[in-house]
Image (cartoon, rainbow, N blue to C red):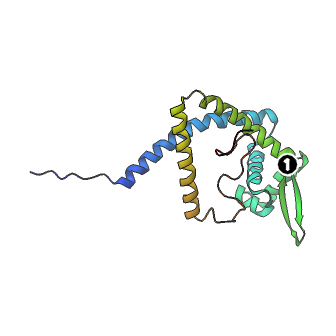
Amino acid sequence: MTQISVDPDPQAERRRAAQAVLADLALAVGSLRCAGSQRLVKLGVSMTHFHVLTLLRHHEAMPIGHLAETLDASMSSATGIIDRMEERGLVRRVRVPDDRRIVLVQPTQAGLDLVDEVELVKSDVMVQALTRLDTAQLERVRAAASDIGAALEQELTAAGALAAGAHGHALGHAHSPAQPRPDQPAP
């Protein structure tokens, strides 16, 4: 009796491997999130406020309606969030000169500085962790990070989430001073 060898589905195998990589990355990133969350607690900033600030860092300004939609919140809830953030000096409201009905929310320098401070804590920890790797390991990590970034950009473009100019940025455009681009020297 002849046995027929069935090749495993290469796409399914790649998907399983990708899920295993993602699970490993999630564990590592979870530790960084905890460090960032602890910093937010010390600064008295809610996760929602931080989320709004990171959105605004990437988009520079957003209509409050779009912000509410992105947060999956009602307009009244989003307005309350922005009110509290404005009182703390983290954001400001700006009316669009051509259509004063539209209110944009922009981060203030204090809001951007807060994002940088939290990201710096995570970056410092990550740099210290990466310095534990040897040169060959660092080169593999850098190559993998570059490959992942390119694949993400392709996937987001294919999904229509990264249409040119859709949100005024491309993947990875907003690097804080704590996170230099790989092709640029650290400050």
Q: Relative to residue 184, is residue 9 depicted above or below?
A: below
Q: Nearer the viewer, residue 184 or 116?
A: 184
CA neighbours of label 1 inside 10 A, class few (<14), some (14 to 19), many (20+): many
Which residue is the extreme one toward the top?
132
Task: Check disc 1 and report the residue beneath it.
Answer: 85
Q: In which quarter of the image is the C terminus?
A: top right
Q: Residue 173: give x, y in percent of width and height.
A: 69, 53
**157 lies above or below 22:** below
Q: Is residue 55 above or below residue 122?
A: below
- Residue 3 is situated, as x and y percent measured from the top left of the image, at 15, 50
Q: Residue furthest bottom?
A: 98
Quarter of the image for residue 126 reads top right
Indicate the position of residue 37 as horizontal and vertical percent values.
71, 36
Left or right: 158 in relation to 39: left
Residue 165 or 31: which is nearer the viewer?
Answer: 165
Q: Which residue lies furthest to the left in this view?
A: 1
Give the vertical position of 167 relative to 55 (above or below).
below
Amino acid type at circle 1 is Met
* Image location (x, y in percent) of residue 36: 71, 36
x 58%, y 26%: residue: 132
Q: Which of 134 and 39 is in front in this view?
A: 134
- Count up the numbered dots: 1
> Residue drawn 64% across and 65% down?
163
Element marked by disc 1 = helix
Which residue is drawn at the image coordinates 81% and 35% (left, top)?
Answer: 43
**Residue appearing at x 65%, y 35% in the figure:** 32
